[in-house]
Image (tube, helix red, strand yellow):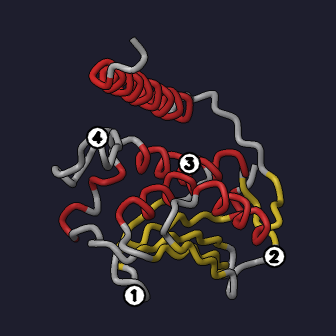
Amino acid sequence: SKDDPRLNGQVEALDADVQEIDDLIASMLSYARLDHPEVRMHWQEVPLENWLKLIIGKSGVDGIDVSLDVTNGPRKAWMDPRLMELALSNLLVNACRYSKHAVRCVAAQSNDEYWLAVEDDGRGIPQAEREKVFKAFTRIDDSRNRETGGYGLGLAIVARIAQLHGGEASVETSPELGGAKFQIRWSYTGKS
């Protein structure tokens, strides 16, 4: 019967399992598509501040304050906005998951390079683990379980999108917030 709390609990657990499998398949397909040699880049000049606000709005997590700093950013940036949105969303969700209270998104331009960074006030990434976090199926936090989620594909997707833009992804300690600072750096001179 619908009023049986034990049965309702089992149905909810099944729903959660199906959702988890669905999420894993979606992540694996995204990663596989990005690794295909025929992947096409759709370069566009994107109005950066509005684009960032839109993505931050979609990716926000309740209780986490995501601030935006475009002080040193260009008004427009050359990128594939669909792919870069996937990368930035992965970074924002990751930062919100591990932050205590604050996440910061920074856009900047230096000479012919663009920078997008996502910083948090969480525990950060130990120096020894920084190289491998961008490899597929790597999870450095053994305590991650169903509550925190993740399959070790999000950061691999970020790294691949950075490569497709002729750039790279990296991680260091956030000087402002003290947690992790993930960044994507790419050059618009490589635009095809």
Quarter of the rendering containing residue 51 = bottom right
The numbered mark at residue 161 is 3
Q: CA distance from mark 4 to mark 2?
A: 40 Å
Dot 1 or dot 3: first in sequence order is: 3
| Residue at 45%, 63% in the rendered image | 96
- Secondary structure beneath dot 2 equals loop
The numbered mark at residue 146 is 4
Tell which of 73 and 162 is nearer to you: 73
Quarter of the rendering containing residue 128 = bottom left
Within 10 Å of the Cα at label 1, are there few (<14), some (14-19), or many (20+) other Cα atoms?
Answer: few
Q: Assign the N terminus to one quadrant of the image.
A: top left
Q: CA distance from mark 4 to mark 1?
A: 31 Å
Q: At label 4, which amino acid type do we have? A: Arg
Dot 4 or dot 2: first in sequence order is: 2
Q: At label 2, which amino acid type do we have? A: Arg
Dot 3 or dot 4: first in sequence order is: 4
Dot 1 or dot 2: first in sequence order is: 2
| Residue at 27%, 53% in the rendered image | 132
Relative side of 50 to 155, left or right: right
Q: At label 3, which amino acid type do we have? A: Ile
Dot 4 or dot 1: first in sequence order is: 4
Measuring from the top left, give residue 81's x and y in whole percent. 73, 51
Within 10 Å of the Cα at label 3, are there few (<14), some (14-19), or many (20+) other Cα atoms?
Answer: many
Relative side of 188 to 130, left or right: right
The residue identified by callout 2 is 75
